[in-house]
Amino acid sequence: MDLIATFPSSQAALRAEQALKGAAMAVELIPVPRQIRGDCGFCLLLAEAGADGAIELRRCGAQELWRVTTTQTDPSSRKVKSYERYP
Amino acid sequence: MNDIRRTVDARGQACPMPVILTRKALAEGGFDLLEVLVDDASSQENVVRFAEYAKCVVAGVEAEGAVSRILIRPGVAAPAAPEARVFAAPAPIPAPAGPDTTVFISSSGIGTGDEQLAALLMRAFLYTLTEAEAAPARIIFMNGGVRLAVEGSEALVNLKRLAERGVEILACGTCLEFYQLKDALAVGRVSNMYEIAGLLLQGRTLSI
């Protein structure tokens, strides 16, 4: 699953990114998707995360975790992403 | 039929001189075939690209050791010799979803203020472009912006995604050279001021 982790501040997201990259985790710093929160801000995307990934994100100060689901009705259409809270 | 030839010897000349000399010769005219001698690969690429941009026919490129002889027939109206071939565009570029929009990036971050925040905003912007419904036709990097397109750049993953979507990535060759990053360009291709200025003046440009 792909997980998105939100943080209380941009600095916190950046610190977590550095810590997780230091631990060889392939996180990506991206803007918070508008479906999750309207504010401007950064979050971390961890592709193909397992339960361990979720734990690591939390350990690094993640506020909320969201599971990303990507759907594409046919190859020519646009991918649509939806988000649900990850417990 | 004997062509009236003219030779421009641009060997040993640094960018952008080979292109300037070629342009000058084409503007003066009075020949059927222009041969331009250059001795480095990026000069060759730039002269060929300029000739195509100037609607000339590149009739061939002959290499003799380190020296390349670029044969150019001026003007669209000039009939091409049977053996002539028009160089194909560097790569087929699928039509982008958006209008003919150029994004011009002249710094490695967005705006002035804290440098770390500027860099973050730039990364986020480039990621957002990968998700945008209408991708730009091209992104041009100049000055500090070229740092985004070289090995080790955090933005590289998103630039590669954009390139896969058909967005053309162009980096200023003079700038890469200035920052000694010429061999480090990791996505897109090297361009020059003539091509860049031409692209900025055509269609819509967003300057970041």
Image (tube, helix red, strand yellow):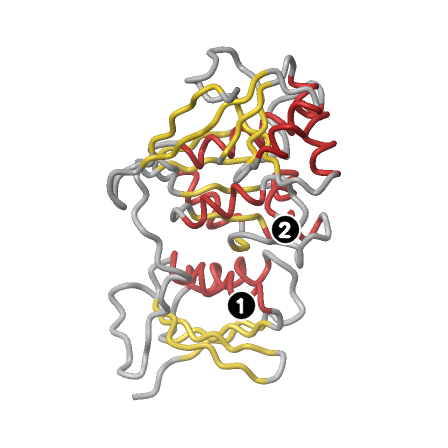
Q: Where residue A1 appears, x then y in whole percent? A: 48, 36
Whichever of labels 2 and 1 marks the residue nearer the N terminus, that label is 1
In the rendered image, residue A32, in percent from the top left (x then y), is placed at: 51, 21
Crowdedness near tag 1: few (<14), some (14–19) or many (≥20) residues, C-alpha within 10 Å: many
Relative height, residue B154 to residue B176 (above, below): above
Mark pair 2, 1: CA separation: 15 Å
Q: Determine the secondary structure under disc 1.
A: helix
Residue plotted at (37% across, 62% down): B89
Secondary structure of the residue carrying numbered label 2: helix
- Residue B156, percent across and down? 58, 44
Q: Quadrant of the N terminus of chain B?
A: bottom left
Question: Residue extending furthest bottom?
Answer: B1
Q: Is residue B15 left or right of residue B49?
A: right
The residue shown at (61%, 84%) is B65
In the displayed structure, B110 sits above or below B98; it is above
Q: Residue at x 70, y 34 (%)?
A: A20
* Chain identifier of the residue bearing label 2 in the image: B
A79 or B117: nearer the viewer = A79
Horizontal side, residue B124 vs residue B12: left or right: left
- Count neighbours of disc 2 (C-alpha within 10 A) and say few if under 14, some if 14 to 19, many if 20 or more: many
Looking at the picture, which amino acid does disc 2 mark?
A: Thr
Kindly identify which residue carries mark 2. Answer: B174
Q: Nearer the viewer, residue A40 or B52?
A: A40
Q: Nearer the viewer, residue B164 or A86?
A: A86
**Chain for numbered disc 1:** B
Q: Residue A45 sits in which quadrant?
A: top right
From the viewer's perspective, is B86 left or right of A5? Answer: left
Tag 1: amino acid? Gln
- What residue is pinned by disc 1? B44
Residue B118: x and y in percent read: 64, 25
